[in-house]
Image (cartoon, helix red, strand yellow):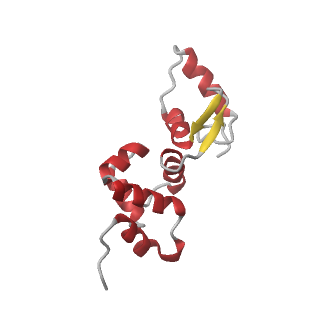
């Protein structure tokens, strides 16, 4: 058997028929640029990209999926706090930004996130 030579080949070999479209998109992006550049685009490490592609990542795949769909596949959500459509990756980034009570924009965004179906912070429904 010929060894996998591209990230997309590695993903197909590891995931087989269960290969999600977003993992393939992640692998293809790494093939078109570099693993490190792809990792930077989704706001994670190169080793995470490798372990997701090889189907050995033990963490929360739904978070990685949202980041890939937003940053690499153009998936958007409407953000009530920002009043506009944003990428799923930006949505996750905004939620992970520390709360600063002296910043009125951050406080308003935090309140809007609490009732949002896309929120992963306490009070959200995802």
Q: Nearer the viewer, residue 20 or 5?
A: 5
Dividing the picture into quarters, in which one does residue 8 lie? bottom left
- What's the residue at 50%, 54% (across, down)? 60
**Quadrant where the N terminus is found in the figure:** bottom left
Dividing the picture into quarters, in which one does residue 101 lie? top right
Looking at this view, name the residue that lies furthest to the bottom: 1
Residue 121, percent across and down?
Answer: 59, 38
Left or right: 112, with 61 as reference point: right
Residue 44, percent across and down?
Answer: 39, 46
Q: Nearer the viewer, residue 121 or 18?
A: 18
Relative to residue 16, is residue 84 depicted above or below? above
Residue 46, percent across and down?
Answer: 32, 52
Residue 31, percent across and down?
Answer: 35, 59
- What's the residue at 41%, 68% (across, down)? 11
Relative to residue 14, is residue 63 depicted above or below? above
Dividing the picture into quarters, in which one does residue 52 lie? bottom left
């Amino acid at each position: 058997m010929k060894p996998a030579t591209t990230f997309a080949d590695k993903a197909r070999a590891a995931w087989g028929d269960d290969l999600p479209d977003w993992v393939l998109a992640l692998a293809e992006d790494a093939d078109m640029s570099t693993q490190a550049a792809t990792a930077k685009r989704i706001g994670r490490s190169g080793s995470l990209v490798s372990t997701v592609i090889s189907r050995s990542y033990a963490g929360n795949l739904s978070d990685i999926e949202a980041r890939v769909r937003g940053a690499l596949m153009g998936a958007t959500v409407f953000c009530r706090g920002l009043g506009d459509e944003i990428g799923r990756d930006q949505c996750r980034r905004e939620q992970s930004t520390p709360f600063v009570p002296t910043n009125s924009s951050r406080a308003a965004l935090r309140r809007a996130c609490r009732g949002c179906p896309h929120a992963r912070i306490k009070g959200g429904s995802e």
